[in-house]
Amino acid sequence: MADLALQLFIGAFNGISIGSVLLIAALGLAIVFGLMGVINLAHGELMMLGAYATFFVQNVFNGWGDPWAQIYTIAAIPVAFLVAALVGLILERGVIRFLYGRPLETLLATWGVSLILRQFVRTTVSTRNVDVTAPAWLRGGIQIPTGAVPIQLPYARIFIIILTIICVVGVYFFLNRSSWGLRIRAVTQNRSMSACLGIPTAQVDALTFALGSGLAGVAGCAITLLGSVGPNTGQNYIIDTFMVVVVGGVGNLFGSIISAMVIGIVTYLIGSGTFATLLSPVDWLQPVVEFFNFFADSSMAKVMVFGLIIAFLQVRPAGIFPPKGRAVEL
Amino acid sequence: MVQANFGRRKFLLYGTAALGTSILLKACGAPPEQSGTTTPGGGTTSTPSGDGDTIKVGILHSLSGTMAISETTVVDAEKLAIKEINEAGGVLGKQIEAIVEDGESDWPTFAEKAGKLIDQDQVSVVFGCWTSASRKAVLDVFESKDHMLWYPVQYEGQECSRNVFYTGAAPNQQIEPAVEWLLENKGDKFFLVGSDYVFPRTANTVIKEQLKVLGGETVGEDYLPLGNTEVTPIITRIQQALPDGGVIFNTLNGESNDAFFKQMQGAGLSPDKYPIMSVSVAEEEVRQIGPEFLKGHYASWNYFQTVDTPENTKWVADFKAEYGDDRVTNDPMEAAYIMVYLWKQAVEEAGTTDIEAVRAAAVGQTFDAPEGKVTMNANHHLSKTVRIGEIREDGMFEIVYETDGPLDPEPWNQFVPDTKGYGCDWTDPTKGERYKMEA
């Protein structure tokens, strides 16, 4: 029984850790796409800029030697946030503000921006990927001695889960407890009424977009712990982030949290073959077991997750939490 | 009136459009970015090469897109060889003029540019391609125009074209010796991890057949879409399939390798219990992923920068002098470098750049390469020495195993039932691409 409990715990941990990577990547988009309605295809490239900011902070701190080299990841988070937020601000002031309410043009324009940013990095830094190595204290993991299989919970994953929680809580308080958050919510709910009441909507737009972009930068910093850093890094995440926001329901941050976690856990359970293992003792379920075994590989798991999402969107076309009230009519 | 909110229908429409577009873009491998620095050489004259003062050769690799990272290094190696040959007086008394085209990591573009090099530039030979997908795409072009391609990268075999010379390893010169070495030294339970495209799938078929014959066991296999970086489910499957440790055979390509090695270390799967043998990780990749994550794992190649031959010492020094001290050399670069010399020797023996004559003269050419002596066989593949390297702290490879001499290439795999017993011989008109060898 203890073994089953341990397996469930490991499953939950791994699922949540996949989910938190999805969530931290999608959080900025949930604001930009969800609250503002801007389809930002350059979101992945803002993450990439955050990852490169981390790379530069690493090099500077490594130059100073220990103990600085040990804490560069912490210092990189605000730097990545500021770099991405600044680029986002320029992007909003320079391009996107002329395109509000014209989603197709925004889509093309932001895709163009994503190409420009990628090429910018290729020409200024390098076409090659760069090496970002986490400090030693983030590279190991917590040993779990029990059970037949020795398990280690990676510190990098725990770090990302904590960082995601901090970001979510921070965004929640910012939107719900600060005066700028109040203005953002007012503008996203009814722009013309907010403008009548004296809210500087242009400034609010710029701030919201910069916030969403900055969160993308933080996500970029986080993913350096797990994957590669190169000009194409952002492209690996852009589909997943849109998927999270669409499934969660646009305009609802809570929906994005739920959908990221559900997608993470389902991806893990299918991809790792846990479904098949759990069901295998039951005789009459053998066809189901074989079905899940067929999908127990990363490529096939992705196919199945997309299939499930399509089926889900048939039932609930507007996601887990559809927009309510007058926003629907507009 | 500026309106940011929009309704459910519109949202669905645009949201689907956005998602669809991005999926489409990703599915196409790499977006066709207009970033290539194509170097159109030699103006627009269409003088057949060999008639003028120079001999034109084509270089066809991706200079932009996802494959540019790897392929530009190969272009550097080819250019170095051409420069050296030109400084030594050229070929047949003429200078070599390289015409570089960008395949843009896009397979139809490769085919189009190959046609351009042959028809418009009238080159004598093309050096090019990296991925098997791009080679398959240009194969038709070279076969229908009866031209000549030299291909410098290890690949999955099961191909033997009259119009291609393969200077990278066939599976029996890289994958099969690696499996044998692992069985002897590291255990008989194998977990196969690969990217989801033709090379890893074919390579893993070969490995599975080989393990069946040699008494090993395949306990699992998993494929990751190219570029995907979420490997947690794979790590769980490895832990379940190999609770007491075992061998992991890695045919992942590109960015997934970074994620795989970083997360394997995070999960505590260390090389002493879970040694990973890679066939697509060389010096350049080690530098980009970071040696901290790779130390103690293995790779199988014909060439490492640490190979101890006088030719290699000289080549590494020359390469660094040309391109900078921070550059490294690796197996595909070495294969690209020597193929230019092999072609040059064939041209000199034939006394002409005529394709047919050069093709006949190329077979039997030998060269004292940085990796040791290589010989071009009748099946258009090279005899090569096979080495296994353990990754060191400085990112270089400690060579832990080396075959006694060069191994002869077998393009048709001798473990896969469909091709067992078949060979390839282009010097004998009755044999050709695929014939039944005598037992």
Image (tube, rainbow, N blue to C red):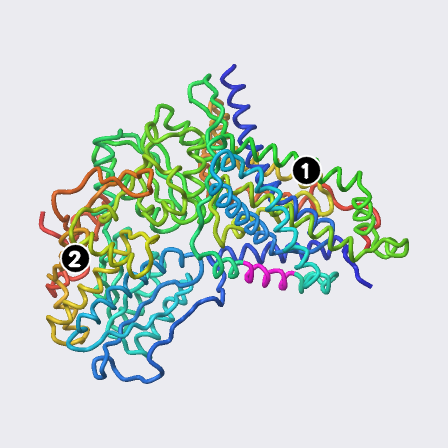
Across and down, in percent, residue B395 comes to 33, 42
Q: Is residue A20 magenta?
A: no
User: Which span is picked out in magenta?
Assistant: A107-117
Which residue does the numbered mark 2 point to in the structure image? B424
Visible residue check, residue B370 = yes
**Do the residues marked 2 and 1 share a common chain?**
no
Chain of the residue displaying label 1: A
Is A99 displayed left or right of A115 in the figure? right
**Proximity of marks 2 and 1: CB atoms separated by less than 8 Å:** no
Vertical placement of A226 versus B360: above or below? above
At horizontal 52% and vertical 20% (from top left) the residue drawn is A6
Q: Which residue is mark 1?
A: A168
Let me know if residue A114 is in the magenta part: yes
Please say if B322 is above or below B112.
above
Label 1 sits on a secondary structure element that is helix
Q: Residue at 37%, 76% (x, y): give it.
A: B40
Occupied quadrant, residue A167: top right
Q: Secondary structure at mark 2?
A: strand
Q: Is residue A22 left or right of residue A175?
A: left
Identified by mark 2, the residue type is Cys
| Front residue (pair B351, B146) | B351
Q: What x and y, as percent, mark residue A91?
A: 66, 59
Is residue A246 at least partly visible in the picture? Answer: no
Chain letter behind tag 2:
B
- Of the 4 image quadrants, the one containing the C terminus of chain A is bottom right
Name the residue rendered at 36%, 27% in the picture.
B242
Residue B268, image x, y percentages: 42, 28
- Our reading of the magenta stretch's main secondary structure is helix
